[in-house]
Image (cartoon, rainbow, N blue to C red):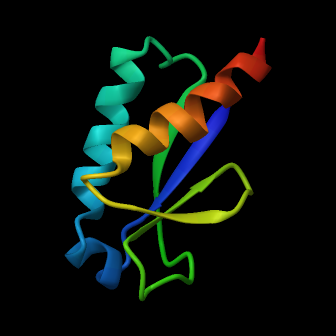
Amino acid sequence: MIVINVCIGSACHIKGSYNVINSLQQLTEEFGLSNVVDTRAAFCLGHCTEAVSVQINDGEVRSVSGATVRDFFINQVVPLTNQQG
């Protein structure tokens, strides 16, 4: 299972964390990956000055916005699903 943690702390909330979560959930459905990708809300990931903080499993914390969430999903998440099988 690939776990995507999206920060919902106050700074990320203001920057649109709930929109990022909704987009990630929609993309997961669109790509038919509901059985391998789980998007979760998380509290502060420690990158408050950047865009919404997102972490895949225990990996690097990345900054994602509504404008970049699709590219993030395609380039960072989808390749990991190929390693799951």
What percent of the width, then of the height, locates residue 43?
48, 73
Outermost residue toward the bottom in this view: 49
From this view, report whether residue 2 is shown above or below residue 6.
above
Give the camera-side residue of 38 and 71. Answer: 71
Give the camera-side residue of 13 and 76. Answer: 76
At a point 26% along the width and 73% down the height, the residue shown is: 13
What percent of the width, then of the height, locates residue 38?
52, 35
At a point 73% along the width and 57% down the height, the residue shown is: 59
Image check: 80 left or right of 22?
right
At a point 28% along the width and 40% down the height, the residue shown is: 23
At a point 33% along the width and 75% down the height, the residue shown is: 12
Residue 84 sits in quarter = top right
What is the number of callouts on the image? Answer: 0
Residue 29 sits in quarter = top left
Quadrant of the image for the C terminus? top right
Image check: 76 left or right of 44?
right
From this view, report whether residue 80 is shown above or below residue 29.
below
What percent of the width, then of the height, locates residue 63?
46, 66
What percent of the width, then of the height, locates residue 16?
23, 65
Quadrant of the image for the N terminus? top right
